[in-house]
Amino acid sequence: MHARVMAPQEILLPVKPAFIVVTLLGALFLNLLPWSGAWLWLRPDFVALVVLYWCVEQPRRIGFTAAWLLGLLMDIADGSLFGQHALAYAVLAYAGIVLHRRVQRFSITPQVLHVIPLLLLNDVIVLVIRTVAGSDFPGYQYFIGSFIGGALWPPLSFLLKLPQRPAPDPDHV
Amino acid sequence: MEHSPPPFFKTGPTPLARLLIFSALSLVLLVADARFRYLTVLREAASVVVYPLQRIASAPASIARRAGEFFVTHSALREQNARLTQDHVAKAAALQQLQALQAENAHLRGLLGTRERVNAKSTLAEVLYAARDPFTRKIVIDQGLQHGVKAGQPVIDSIGVVGQITQTYPWLSEVTLITDKGQLVPVLNVRNGLRAVLAGTGNDGVLELKFIPLNADFQNGDRLVTSGIDGVYPPGLPVAEVSNVERNAAYLFARIECKPLAGVNSNTQVLIVDAERQLPDRPAIADKPAPSRKLRKGM
């Protein structure tokens, strides 16, 4: 039981800063795809997901400044209020940095249970800002994206760790 | 953070302090944007950074659409051709009348001494994508400041009004659809000429007439066209059809729901109308303080 909940100890190579930048831009690209209709509701916030991943895994390399600037870019691209995503991502980065030791200790399934509430928090911040600014509640389907984002956490974390895994040693028996 | 490093290893402020700094910055931006609309220029400048990514991201969809157009079947084309020919014949008669009517109208207007109605110029724009903000109803089109698009211009499709340009960027602009909450269009009931203000509700496909007295003559199926009183929309563009009238004596106003006529959510191409009209200046309201000035002079 204990072994299943706790993460197996792995030795990983250091991450390249360029790789972090590329993944963040990739997430921004995924967010900017022309989602519409039901797909828009199903779409997880990829940028939030990747920002959270790097804040948990590499809190010394990536933090508030990157999260905040990405939030501003999202606001410009979406034509939404200036600063709403910036604020939400800053809070997400804070949560990721504060919780990183705790989340890293867990294996992948309990990690998802940490990620979903954080993504929901991200949604709620945006929702509160928009409600204060005079918009209506868009319906509960607004939160679906966060659950899908949580479901994407295991494959995402597998993919983003690939470049850090050392090549198998040919001499190892 | 019990396991934080000893103080002399620390670099920079704690996460909480950073959070507070960045939250404060965001709140300043939010207030500046929502309350005072100071940030339009900043948005335009910063959009240059996002623009390439936006274009690349919307490329797959438009390529797929073009590919789909290339592979139309022979029967579909024949069907469309037959329909268009029929349409053409039906409209030819009306068109011939139109020319005569236009000449007559111009003559009468000349007699009345009224200004000739401006022949509005229009630019074709392609819809890049619907804005991904679930709180608003907006679309982004591929014409911007560089193409002479100005904020405030109405946007129509082949049937009627789609929305209004609300934000321009160098190569893109944002169109707020008439279904967006708080988007207003001054309209006219075609059947009896009653003027009203049509407001979006934030729901797709539902518009609402605001501040209509209970006894006003609106019925299901009434067509509403732009009245042109605002000087923004050229007069006579179809906007919506009344779909539901609810008169409840408990409320001051009737609740009148309408359906937009144009394909507000389904277009891939729209027209931007450049209908700047020379309206006479509004009567000055600055006359009011005049008496007090006189009084002071008298003293």
Image: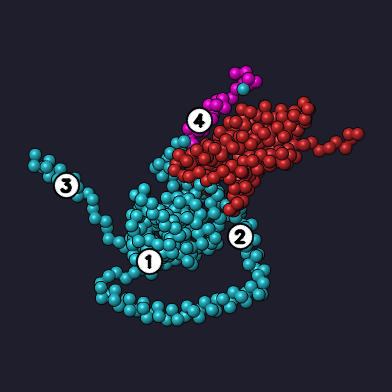
Q: Among all residues in the image, which is located at the extreme right?
A: A173
Q: Badge 2 is on which residue?
A: B62
Which is more foreground, mark 1 or mark 2? 1
Residue stretch in magenta: B2-26
Label 3 chain ID: B
Q: Among all residues in the image, which is located at the extreme left?
A: B298
Q: Residues within 10 Å of mark 3 (few under 14, many from 20)?
A: few
Circle number at residue B290: 3
Task: Say which element carries label 1.
Answer: loop
Which is more foreground, mark 3 or mark 1? 1
Q: Badge 1 is on which residue?
A: B190
Residue B145 visible in the snapshot = no
| Residue A34 in magenta stretch | no
Q: Residue at x 75, y 29 (%)?
A: A5
- Residue B131: give x, y in percent of width and height: 53, 51
In the image, what residue type sits under mark 4? Ile
Give the prevailing secondary structure in the magenta stretch. Answer: helix
Coloration of the structure image? by chain
Q: Residues within 10 Å of mark 1 (few under 14, many from 20)?
A: some
The N terminus of chain B: image quadrant: top right
Q: Residues within 10 Å of mark 2 (few under 14, many from 20)?
A: some
Q: Which chain is red?
A: A
Left or right? Give the position of B138 relative to A115.
left
Q: Which chain is cyan?
A: B
- Cα distance between the residues tagged 4 and 2: 41 Å
Circle number at residue B21: 4
Label 1 chain ID: B
Tell which circle, 3 or 1, labels the residue nearer the N-terminal end: 1
